[in-house]
Image: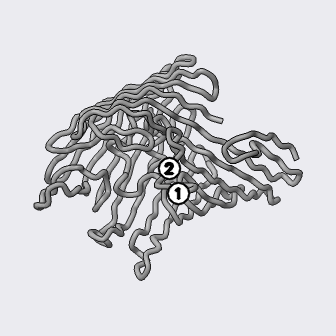
Amino acid sequence: MKTILCAGALGALCMNAVAADGASVSVYGLVDVALVRETGGSGGDVTKLTSGVGAGSRLGFKGREELGNGIAAIFLLESGFQADTGALGQGGLLFGRQAYAGLQGGFGTLTAGRQYTPQYLTVVMADPFASGYAGDTKNLMAPTGNSASRMDNSLKYVSPAIGGVSAELVYGAGEVTGDSAAGRQFGGALDYTSGPLRVRLGYHNRNNDTAAIKNAGSAKNTVLAAVYDFGVVKAHVAYGVDKGPNSSLLRNTANPYGRPGTPVASSDSRDVLLGATIPSGPHTWMVSWIHKDDRGALDQDASQYALGYRYALSRRTELYTSIAHIVNRHGASYTVGSAIEGGTGNGAVDVGIRHAF
């Protein structure tokens, strides 16, 4: 066995091991730390040193074993953590980012566990900020109220690409005792790639299981996204439709039905994203505009303007900075966050470093 050993917090780890029978295990990770200034919050401005601004800090284990006849067993375990404090991310879950096992072959890939939803991956593809930094799509358009980015207890199938077209299907059991429909999720995506063009259509449906709206209907999120690489600039565009109870972000505002301070979930909105990525050697500029069109009675629209810059010190290390501002209307109070945090105000600027290994 070929082994590369490293020292770390967990002791001696096998960074890359390949056995004689074709089985392999890799250890990888990312550490992201930044200084962030958030403005416009109800409690005042705040400056903090935090983790996971450009992308969530993580430690992962990825494995593959050849079983013969073109079929392989695969697994992935990915743990998120806070580099500024050492705490576990994703609410303290050991492998809160991803945890799955499955089979891969000419038929495609079938996996079971905690995985990203096809709809969320569609949003990430469209976002010049890749769902991170101050310009993160989750500030306005990712389905935080519905599916978030991952789903537990899920079965996922990804087809092989034929003529540039591939498909994804996912199903997640709600596992609510006495009610098989509550919390149940399903979704899918169609992906088309041809040269510099990539187009992706994603959908997610989740039956609500909270006490207030249990089985009150399903939250549905649909997004159509496209990216075209002109070489000197990459253009990004996306259009999303959010329908049903708890289908979009929570509005941090007074409840119109008489209970001040109670969050209200959007049940009908449209999202539009326009953006660009401009690479030049080690330099990369990112810019985006996102608009949320709230179709509810309060008409709480919002628009986000974001600009970012990355400088590659090497293939694995980069410095970055980004700034974003949200214009809220009619009592909306959307906030500028980052890859793993929601933010406290309608503006933020960050300066950070991240290293992949």
Would residue 116 be found to the left or right of residue 133 on screen?
Answer: right
Residue extending farthest to the bottom is 178
Question: Which residue is at a point 31% across and 53% down the rendered structure image?
Answer: 248
- In the displayed structure, 250 sits above or below 273; it is below
Residue type (three-letter) at the residue carrying disc 2: Gly
Q: Measure how far apart labels 2 and 1 are at the Cα level.
A: 7 Å
Visible residue check, residue 226: no
Colour mode of the rendering = one colour
Visible residue check, residue 330: yes
- In the displayed structure, 170 sits above or below 179; it is above
Residue 205 image position (x, y, % from top left): 40, 61
Residue type (three-letter) at the residue carrying disc 1: Leu
Locate the C terminus and report the quarter of the image it occupies.
Answer: top right
Question: Which residue is at a point 74% across and 42% down the rendered structure image?
Answer: 15
Q: Secondary structure at mark 2?
A: loop
Nearest the eye: 339 or 35: 35
Would residue 69 be found to the left or right of residue 239 on screen?
Answer: right
Question: Which residue is at a point 67% across and 49% down the rendered structure image?
Answer: 61
Query: What residue is pinned by disc 2?
Result: 89
- In the displayed structure, 179 sits above or below 256; it is below
Nearest the eye: 15 or 42: 42
Question: Which residue is at a point 39% across and 48% down the rendered structure image?
Answer: 223
Check whether the beta carbons of the residues at disc 2 and disc 1 lie within 8 A of each other.
yes
Residue 118 image position (x, y, % from top left): 49, 52
Callout 2: few (<14), some (14-19), or many (20+) C-alpha neighbours within 10 Å?
many
Callout 1: few (<14), some (14-19), or many (20+) C-alpha neighbours within 10 Å?
few
Q: Secondary structure at mark 1?
A: loop
- Quadrant of the image occupied by residue 323: top left
Which label sits on residue 93? 1
Residue extending farthest to the left is 258
